[in-house]
Image: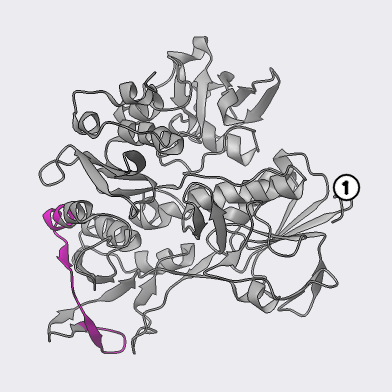
Amino acid sequence: MPKINFVLPDGSQQTIDAAVGQSIMEAATANLVKGIVADCGGGCSCATCHVYVDPEWVAKLTPADDVEQSMLEGAIDPNERSRLSCQLRMSDALDGIVVHVPAAQF
Amino acid sequence: MSELNVDSTVVIVGAGQAGGEAAAELRRQGFAGRVIMLGEETQPPYKRPPLSKAYLSGAATQESLYVMQPAQLDKVKIEFRGNTKVVRIDRKDKLLELADGSTQKYDKLVIATGGRARPLPLPGADASNVFVLRTIEDVQKIKALCEPGKRVTIIGGGFIGLEGAAVLVKMGLKVTLLEGLPRVLARVTVPEVSAFFERVHREAGVDLRTGAQLAGFEGTPVNAVTLADGTRIETDFVVVGIGLIPNTELADAAGLKIDNGIVVDQYARTGDPDIYAAGDCTNHPSTFLGRNVRLESVQNAMEQGRAVARNILGKNEPYQTVPWFWSDQYDLKLQTVGISGAHDQIVLRGDPATARNFAVFYLKGGKLIAADTVSRPQEFMFAKKLVAEGAVIDPAKLADESVPMKSLATPAA
């Protein structure tokens, strides 16, 4: 099972196991990771699963589509590493990915 | 009011999204006592929005609807009991009487009983091929009948009816949608938006009829729907989406105040300091709207569910939210923020009469109070911020597509 490392705003880290095909958001909510509330449940409609992807992992992800990109531009404190974690599907290639949870979601 | 500790028990009645989120937040906040969630359905908490969208179409599996699988609930010690009906709340002894005759004590109680689909008040509505769409079980029954060429009649031009129509027509069914009012979505939006959705559904092949007065059903099971004007619509099955009835009976019988929902204060607490409530079944004071409101949305269920958990743990945080909502139909994403109706001006950005994406902004005294956006996620996200701020915005700039939304979000000095 590929692992996901969530870095919380206080610097603490939470590592969880995800299933291949599961989104990072789904893995986070199932494991009660704080700050990933995902109110719309993965519909790319609310941006409450916003994360900053660690620089070394950004290029390994499928780029954001137009809807996700537009949602992100209006999210709270977006930057060039912003993604909606409901749109990021886990694969073995992403084993060990590091994502940072925005302080604004606390 | 007693302080909670490791020996305390929080019982949540209702295992929908509000109940599930309250349980999850209790654990996220570090509550170490017992969390017991009692649900009438056999299912652990699941996401309802996909029921009329990706689950109906087959794009989402049943497994993907669960926020937490039973094994994960066990892991974080959320005790879920399905198929469990609470028949009475004994507030004096702080215990619940269950339908099987057993009892369950609580220190704090959360009522998250949600709502049930409003039944059609018409003879024949209880036929085996007339369905509502609220639960996994409802959708499973509908899906079993979905074959290309089958005729379905959808009663109700609200979100459930329209989302269902979009999915079913794409699956190759012959879809007739009947709305009793002169336009679809009449309760939630302006005529321009209603007309837009009527157009796209008709373009997709839905036989959409507004102002359709139902007269009755023919056959058992139903094989035709008749209208007051004599029209007869042959059909293989019927889906009814005419709204929701909040499940307030349990709270009412316990003597809690009911007024279009279980009345809670800004801390999501009922008149009993040990009983909280969250989700579709509640009526809460909204600072944003300046009045009490009962919201039927997953956003409210989730946010109020979290608020309940935090306030049970003594955080004393008022529940203040700006309502938002979305609906996916075909390739279109409708996103709304705020509640229109109190507006005195509407501003269009884009043209709903010709395009497949646009935004409608609602202003009151110059202040942005709500927006409906169709396939304009950026407009939605900025409107969400501006509505929350109560921003006063120049209508000409809102209407001008060459003015980026981003620039409107920067408060003028």
Chain letter of the residue carrying label 1: B
Image position, residue B31 (x, y; %):
79, 44
On screen, residue B158 above or below B286:
below
Image position, residue B54 (x, y; %):
37, 50
Pick the front one: B194 or B270: B270
Q: Is residue B211 magenta?
A: yes
Residue B177 in the figure: left or right of residue A23: left
Residue B318 in the figure: left or right of residue B8: left
Pick the front one: B219 or B347: B347
- Give the extent of the magenta segment: B199-225
In this view, which residue lies farthest toward the front?
B365
Q: Is residue B272 magenta?
A: no
Image position, residue B188 (x, y; %):
33, 57
- At a point 12% along the width and 54% down the height, the residue shown is B203
Callout 1: SS: loop
From this viewpoint, is residue B240 visible?
yes
On screen, residue B220 above or below B380:
below
Residue A9 in the figure: left or right of residue B399: right
- At a point 44% along the width and 27% down the height, the residue shown is A75
Pick the front one: A64 or B223: A64
Which quadrant of the structure image shows residue B219?
bottom left
Where is mark 1, residue-wise? B6
Image position, residue B408 (x, y; %):
32, 25
For the N terminus of chain A, the quadrant is top right
Which quadrant of the structure image shows residue A78?
top left
For the C terminus of chain A, the quadrant is top right
On screen, residue B222 above or below B302:
below
Amino acid bearing label 1: Val
